[in-house]
């Protein structure tokens, strides 16, 4: 297949590399002005991929968007006229809230959302390390997206496991809850994920999870409070030495995904008239840091 990866950061470069290895014709769209970019995964040979090539974008069967949530609408709006209406759009990022904008911009395109637990790290712009094996879920946003379940086989062949989820919202909310619990707290206190297991963070962590759980229930998502707490703690343990993506963004003074993580929950809570003071405080604290730069 002809696949364009928009936003070849750590996860985008990982997929670009595996999809190329699986025999697909992959190109990228990035901030770089170079016509080609080089990606070397772990100790494999480096690959060269065309970059910012309008013809290839126009001929793409699939566009995998691995931009961070705050950049999705902004970047796609500059490319709309070059995107064919048959091209499948697949959004893969932390947080929620971009799909409705993308659907408005490109209403005819099949639109899918994905969530992944693979770990990837980019020590330099040309190198990507696959730091943790994970699972990926795809699901449809619109009717034409429902016809694209075959894509699971294509991507699963390149980097297993990939499964189809008939209610991707459910999976995205579960991931969102984990990000709401881990990301802002680790960013605020500048700590690795594992430190959140310490007793001094317990009350704040518990109340963030309780609030998210209430909002999920109001949204009609199937969720059990104790299971949500358990899955947050599982991720804290499994990623104990890692610094969360938001911690890294804040430490490097980069725009974080707070609006699409905690901000999304706070906005949904307001719609349901649910008080979420712990999440609101964290949201404001991260926004304040970003505004102070
Ligand atoms: O955003 C992140 O860093 C990750 O989604 C997670 C699960 C919090 C692990 O660090």
Image (cartoon, grey):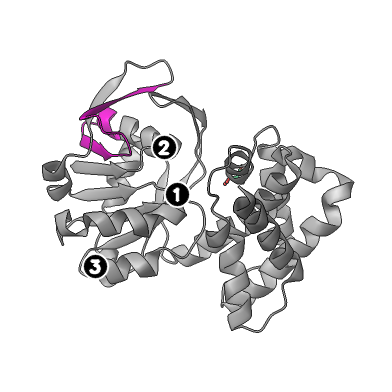
Going by the image, does 10 lie left or right of 48?
Answer: right
Q: Secondary structure at mark 2?
A: loop
Q: Which residue is mark 3?
A: 144
| Up-down relation of residue 125 to residue 148 (above or below) | above
- Residue 73 locus on image (x, y percent): 36, 60
Residue shown at the point (22%, 28%) measured from the top left? 36
| Up-down relation of residue 263 to residue 201 (above or below) | below
Report ligand 1 position as a quadrant.
top right
Marks 3 & 1, CB-CB < 8 Å contact: no
Marks 2 & 3, CB-CB < 8 Å contact: no
- Answer yes or no: is residue 138 visible: no
Magenta stretch in the rendered image: 19-41
Q: Which mark is residue 68?
A: 1
Marks 2 & 1, CB-CB < 8 Å contact: yes
- Answer yes or no: is residue 3 visible: yes
The residues tagged by marks 2 and 1 sit, at their Cα atoms, a distance apart of 9 Å
Between 74 and 49, which is closer to the camera in this rendering? 74
Asked if the magenta segment contains residue 20, the reply would be yes
Q: Secondary structure at mark 1?
A: loop
The residues tagged by marks 3 and 1 sit, at their Cα atoms, a distance apart of 24 Å
Q: Which mark is residue 19?
A: none
Q: Which residue is mark 2?
A: 9
The residues tagged by marks 2 and 3 sit, at their Cα atoms, a distance apart of 28 Å
Q: Earlier in the sequence, mark 2 or mark 3?
A: 2
Considering every residue shown, the one lying at the far front of the view is: 292
- Residue 193 locus on image (x, y percent): 70, 41
Q: Secondary structure at mark 3?
A: helix
Going by the image, does 75 lie left or right of 10?
Answer: left
Considering every residue shown, the one lying at the far right of the view is: 199
Label 2 crowding class (10 Å Cα cut-off): few <14, some 14-19, many 20+? many
Label 3 crowding class (10 Å Cα cut-off): few <14, some 14-19, many 20+? some
């Amino acid at each position: 297949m002809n696949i364009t990866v928009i936003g070849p950061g750590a996860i985008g470069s990982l997929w670009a590399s595996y999809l190329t290895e699986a025999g697909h014709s992959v190109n990228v769209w990035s901030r770089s002005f170079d016509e080609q970019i080089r990606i070397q995964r772990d100790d494999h040979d480096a690959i060269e991929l065309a970059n910012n090539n309008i013809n290839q974008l126009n001929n793409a069967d699939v566009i995998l968007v691995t931009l961070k949530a705050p950049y999705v609408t902004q970047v796609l709006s500059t490319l709309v006229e070059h995107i064919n209406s048959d091209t499948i759009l697949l959004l893969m990022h932390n947080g929620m809230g971009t799909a409705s904008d993308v659907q408005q911009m490109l209403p005819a395109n099949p639109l899918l959302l994905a969530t992944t637990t693979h770990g990837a790290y980019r020590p330099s712009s040309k190198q990507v390390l696959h730091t943790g094996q994970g699972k990926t879920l795809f699901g449809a946003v619109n009717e034409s997206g429902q016809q694209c379940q075959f894509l699971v086989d294509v991507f699963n062949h390149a980097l297993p496991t990939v499964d189809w989820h008939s209610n991707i919202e459910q999976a995205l909310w579960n991931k969102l809850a984990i990000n709401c619990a881990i990301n802002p707290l680790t960013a605020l206190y500048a700590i690795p994920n594992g430190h959140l297991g310490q007793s001094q963070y317990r009350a704040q962590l518990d109340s963030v999870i309780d609030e998210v759980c209430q909002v999920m229930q109001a949204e009609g998502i199937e969720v059990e409070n104790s299971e949500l707490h358990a899955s947050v703690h599982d991720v804290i343990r499994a990623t104990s030495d890692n610094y969360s993506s938001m911690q890294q963004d804040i430490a490097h003074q980069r725009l974080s995904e707070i609006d699409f993580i905690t901000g999304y929950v706070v906005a949904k809570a307001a719609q349901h008239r649910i008080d979420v003071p712990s999440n609101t405080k964290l949201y404001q604290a991260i926004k304040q840091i970003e505004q102070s730069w």
